[in-house]
Image (cartoon, helix red, strand yellow):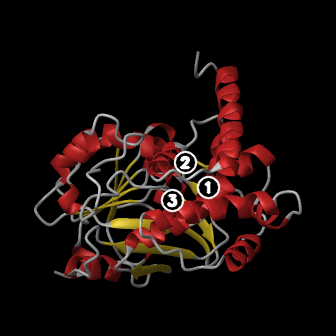
């Protein structure tokens, strides 16, 4: 069966889900989308508009649905939602699976499945801050999962309209570190999409690299109300972001992960992202709940196991939580 005949589902039509849907569709794939609310109505009627480095593109997904009951089992499922939606999504996945379905969560931070598929010295099997009742660890179809790290910056201008000003990179890896046939086939899916898809053996190394990027930029972008170039280069902010990267590196090392990029190069690359704002900054501006569980809470939990202190990270995190709580109270979203 050719890749173009595969049944592909993108679960979520935010910025990342929309970019993925457009690029896969332009490469000739038939992509279905699960969208909700205004996103569903706009995309159903008008499709998705994407402006990126290759120009302006307009596509209509193969199918746009609001409920999994409208779909048959899929070959590939890309979950492009915030982490806190995963508990609701997980029970719905069973109806979308066949034996060889591949599920790829496209989420920031430490994944709930971090300890799945590897031998480790501790008896930890799940991360409490991500999965307090072990619901995900016991109900999510882990045998179908391939891990990912997403290096895509995009802005949802309004439902059905997305803009991106940077190149796209997706890194994929098996939880058990095998370069499997299904991993190879997943990467082949992205031929001609203008998204670089890279298979790796050590996906957790890449996860920690992205966690370092997220923790050193996302909360600070909210606190300082600024963009990536300022976070990594401004004389008042550069020492803060650098300290956070060092704290994350220490925790990563405790779990045997190797962040290969050196601190100076990392900060330089962050500066070169230009006047790009983080997804957390956009969520804060829209008074949405911030994605702090997987980006920060899980890291603090893992750090505590080895007695790793993260004073700078904790300080910026606490300030972010305060600002977010105050903002949500003003909206009446929390009591």
Local secondary structure at mark 1: helix
Residue 88 percent across, percent down from the top left = 32, 37
Q: Which residue is mark 3?
A: 16
* Mark 3 crowd level (few <14, some 14–19, many ≥20, 10 Å Cα): many
Point 43% across, 79% down: residue = 197
Q: Position of residue 332 (x, y in %)?
A: 62, 18
Q: Which residue is mark 2?
A: 296
Which mark sits nearer the N-terminus, 3 or 1? 3
Locate residue 183, reporting x and y percent: 27, 77
Image quadrant assignment for residue 26: bottom left
Q: Which mark is residue 215?
A: 1
Q: Nearer the viewer, residue 155 or 246?
A: 246
Task: Compute the Cα span from label 3 to label 2.
Answer: 21 Å
* Direction from residue 219 to residue 182 in the image, left or right: left
Is residue 92 placed above or below 55 in the rendered structure? above
- Helix, strand or loop for disc 2: helix
């Amino acid at each position: 069966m050719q890749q173009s005949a595969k049944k592909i589902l993108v679960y979520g039509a935010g910025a990342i889900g929309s970019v993925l849907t457009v690029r896969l569709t332009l490469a000739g794939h038939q992509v279905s989308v699960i969208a909700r609310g205004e996103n569903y109505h706009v995309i159903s009627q008008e499709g998705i508009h994407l402006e990126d480095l290759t120009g302006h593109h307009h596509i209509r997904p193969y199918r746009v649905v609001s409920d999994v009951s409208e779909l048959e089992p899929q070959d590939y499922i890309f979950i492009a939602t915030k982490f806190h939606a995963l508990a609701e999504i997980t029970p719905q996945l069973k109806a979308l699976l066949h034996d060889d379905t591949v599920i790829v969560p496209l989420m920031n931070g430490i994944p709930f499945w971090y300890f799945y598929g590897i031998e480790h010295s501790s008896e930890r099997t799940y991360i409490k801050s991500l999965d307090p009742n072990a619901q995900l660890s016991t109900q999510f179809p882990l045998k179908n999962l391939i891990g990912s790290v997403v290096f895509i910056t995009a802005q949802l201008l309004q439902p059905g309209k997305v803009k991106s000003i940077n190149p796209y990179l997706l890194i994929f890896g098996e939880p058990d570190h095998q370069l499997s046939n299904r991993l190879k086939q997943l990467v082949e899916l992205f031929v001609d999409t203008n998204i670089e898809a890279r298979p790796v053996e050590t996906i957790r190394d890449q996860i920690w690299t992205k966690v370092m990027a997220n923790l050193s930029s996302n909360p600070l972008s909210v606190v300082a109300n600024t963009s990536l170039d300022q976070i990594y280069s401004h004389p008042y902010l550069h020492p803060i972001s650098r300290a956070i990267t060092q704290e994350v590196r220490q925790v990563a090392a405790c779990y045997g992960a190797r962040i290969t990029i050196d601190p100076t190069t990392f900060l330089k690359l962050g500066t070169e992202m230009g006047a790009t704002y983080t997804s957390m900054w956009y969520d804060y501006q829209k008074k949405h709940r911030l994605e702090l569980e997987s980006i920060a809470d899980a890291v603090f939990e893992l750090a505590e196991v080895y007695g790793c202190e993260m004073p700078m990270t904790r300080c910026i995190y606490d300030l972010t939580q305060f600002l977010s709580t105050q903002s949500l109270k003003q909206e009446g979203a929390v009591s």
